[in-house]
Amino acid sequence: MRYRVLFETQQPLVTADGPQAGNFIETLGYIPGSAVWGALGGRAARSLRMDDPAQRALFDEAFNGSKALRFNNLYPALLVFDEFDATAATLIPSRPVPRSAVTCKAVPGFRSDRISPLRGIARGHGVSDEVTGHHPNCQSCHARTERVSVEFYTVSVAGAAGSFAPSKSYRVHNEIDDVRGRTKHGKLFAVLGLGRRQFFVGSIEVSDVHPQSGGSWLDLLPTADGAGHPLVLGKRRGSYGGGCMRLELDVPDATCDLWGYTLAERLERTRDGVFNVTLDSDAIIVDEWLQHRADLEPMRAKWQADLGHEIEPTEAWVATRSYAGWNGVDGCPREPELLTAAGSVFTFRAPTADPQELADLLGRAEAEGVGLRRNEGFGKIIINDSFHTAQGIAAGLDAR
Ligand SMILES: [Zn+2]
């Protein structure tokens, strides 16, 4: 069972995943699942009687590392009002741009993007996807191509992809002297946060397994009656992070890509055993020795063993970053972890596999996700995302 989660910022919001140094603090462009997990877990802990063993057990099942509740990232969404009915509005979600996307170096951007090159306003020369072939030059102006630098893309009702960025705003604060409790003269720091009145969309997945403790995990979430619940998220709570969260019951298998293709429809795109895996969120991949890895090799080996046929890695477009969170228990920085970044793309082929068995395996793989801390939204994957199809790149360089 899945809930669609909507969050509207009513204060600026700062989400970050590590200690930040200096006098400038910048938010991430989205709300990590771990921030939703932390906020709802804190709220549940306050409403439960934690000295009651049954309530404590229910809390632990839901929030402490089990897979009962999975909190996926909330990505920025565009609110589009109906042209003829001002009360009707649609939220158009966004996703991280796949790392396999390239664009023109001279006039970068999707063809629906309005950009400002040196002279006037123009449309981007388009985006192509290297999963479908290599695109060293722009078809319009023959300039070299480069990787798309914007973080998110969205797809219009008409099916055209475009880049998307949440709005951010600055606030300048005085630094407080810890001893005197007053502002330090001349000491300022700036916070770049996500702006007010913006929407973020994601999901919470609820396990079908009945809780051992006899309670209901759903009782720990804000009631799903359509009314919004005030909730404070992210860092620097107090003057930041206030907003309204709403949960809506989603249909169980509505795991669609931005073009609306369901998992079943996407699995049908596997031809001759060729398929691709796109990371929808950052992933923490470790091998059997708990060594961090950037690729999906531990999963590939497991999938191959389950299938009983060879699964060969073919190409990969990967970015990594390091993640150094705080350990809340002892107040020390955690050991930095290597993250395989959202948007990384891996292609594989399993030429001898039975198509139905391969589809079943990939369906389970998408539902499970990859790597560690999946309950905090890490390691969510999309099999055969429409971005990597002719339709996905209809706005691409080649189409001109
Ligand atoms: Zn060009």
Image (cartoon, grey):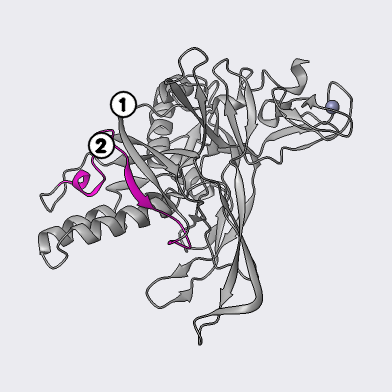
Circles 1 and 2 in contact, beta carbons < 8 Å = no
Element assignment for label 1: loop
Element assignment for label 2: loop
Residue at the disc numbered 2? 224
- Residue 262 among those drawn in magenta: no
Residue 12 in picture, x, y percent from top left? 51, 51
Question: The C terminus is located in which quarter?
Answer: top right
Of circles 1 and 2, which is in front? 2
Residue at the disc numbered 1? 251
- Amino acid type, callout 2: Ala
Left or right: residue 351 versus residue 114 is left
Q: From the viewer's perspective, is residue 136 above or below residue 323?
A: above
Estimate how packed mark 2 is, as few (under 14), some (14 to 19) or many (20 or more) residues with alpha carbons within 10 Å: some
Estimate how packed mark 1 is, as few (under 14), some (14 to 19) or many (20 or more) residues with alpha carbons within 10 Å: few
Spatial CA distance of label 1 from label 2 is 14 Å
Residue beneath the point at 31% across and 53% down: 40
**Ligand 1 image position (quadrant):** top right
* Number of marks in picture: 2
Residue 13 in picture, x, y percent from top left? 50, 52
Left or right: residue 165 versus residue 310 is right
Q: From the viewer's perspective, is residue 126 above or below residue 344?
A: above
Name the one closer to the observer, 40 or 317: 40
Q: From the viewer's perspective, is residue 305 above or below residue 259?
A: below
Residue beneath the point at 36% across and 53% down: 37
Quadrant assignment, res 360 = top left
Q: Please give the label number shown on residue 371.
A: none
**Magenta region:** 216-238
Name the one closer to the observer, 354 or 208: 208
- Residue 235 among those drawn in magenta: yes
Residue beneath the point at 38% across and 37% down: 367
Residue 369 in picture, x, y percent from top left? 42, 43
